[in-house]
Amino acid sequence: MFRPLAILILSLPQLHSAEPTGKADVILKTPGLVAFWDFSEKEGEPRISKGTAQKHALLESPAPIPRVDGGPYSGFSTKLDGSHFLRVPRAKIGNLDIHGKDAQVTLFTVIRVDEMKKGVTVAGIWSEGKGANDDGGTRQYSLLLNMGMYGGPKRLVPHISAEGGVTRRADGSGFPWCADYAVNQSEIPVGKWVTLGSTYDGKYLRAYFNGVMEPRALDPVKDRRNDPYFIREGRDGKDRGMNPYYHGRGIFTYDAEKHAETKPDGAADFTVGACYAVGHKVGNPLIGLVGGVAVFNRALTDEEMKALHDSANIGALEK
């Protein structure tokens, strides 16, 4: 008597269950993990970090953001259209606030960039203020793409800032922007899944494309870095290089009392997919898919960065 019901149940469409292509446990077991997002949550839900005691909720801004099928660690990804982004508000930032003279940080991401006509923000703590020569920014660390000002068109350009505002030479004079970033060799492809990462060990900033730190020497003319800051203010009076890039001054520390007048907009959020730039909350937006973001409070080794890349199994995402 139950046979017709059983047949009916079996004939109903099965609930969709996305399958991850990668291995999240590789990230979760890597020492120094601060936060890891696999973007399994549905549209309208905060994206909650996994694998650590301190949880970090990425909130949708300014409106709900779609979840789509296909992703390395949960089987899903977050789809960004250039008008939305995700953020951990500063008041809730916790141990993502990596700063100080001896601070170290690693960022690792799995993304697909679908458009790169302008600069792109992937993830980090990065507020550029209101524009060129504005020293009111509160930059700390960030993964960015396609910054041609100092030799980074269509490349991965991880940034680090000691000042929060504009970069300053040894004599105290400033650049129009933050000029402290590494640049990888390979052009970042559009429409293909990649892993992008960076490490900062307190001295050198390194860019990793698909798990590899591609060494790149400084070409002062080609890279538009013929300022003495780049060619004579590196380690032991040498040039700063490009990848790795020498930056021995640590990461900006925001102090509400100290910076009340000089940085009135306050400290920056941790964001994915955009940053506050040139007076816009959705500055340098990412158009594409985000399948994984991880932050570590130490500089991972080349071998560890390659292992993270392998964990994403991005080749399977292209099938």
Image: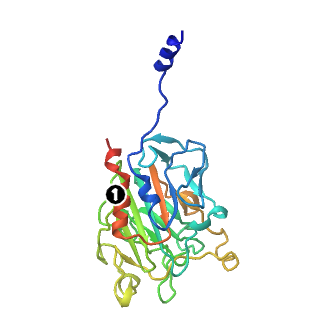
List the single residue furthest toward the front: 1
Locate residue 213: give its quadrant: bottom left
Image point 33% across, 59% down: which residue? 210
The residue lying at 31 percent from left, 59 percent from top is 187
Q: Is residue 120 visible?
A: no
Q: Vertically, is 63 above or below 200? A: above
Q: Is residue 152 above or below residue 55?
A: below
In which quadrant is the N terminus drawn?
top right
For residue 259, above or below residue 16: below
Q: Residue at x 36, y 69 (%)?
A: 183
Quarter in which the C terminus is drawn: top left
Residue at the spot x=59%, y=76% of the render?
253
Question: Which quadrant of the structure image shows residue 179?
Answer: bottom left
Residue 156 at x, y = what percent?
Answer: 38, 63
Q: Is residue 89 left or right of residue 182?
A: right
Describe residue 129's horizontal placement relative to residue 119 as left or right: right
Numbered disc total: 1
Between 104 and 277, the one nearer to me in the picture? 104
| Residue 4 appearing in the image | yes
Find residue 133 and report its horizontal and vertical position in percent: 54, 74
Q: Residue lying furthest top in this view?
A: 1
Q: Quadrant of residue 305?
A: bottom left
Task: Assign a secondary structure to mark 1.
Answer: loop
Q: Nearer the viewer, residue 137 or 271?
A: 271
The residue under label 1 is 188
Residue 240 location in percent, x, y?
36, 81
For label 1, the crowd category at 10 Å Cα-Cα, with few meaning under 14, some 14 to 19 and many 20 or more, is many
- Residue 38: x and y in percent read 49, 51
- Residue type, label 1: Ile
Check the image and tell me how it is coloured.
rainbow
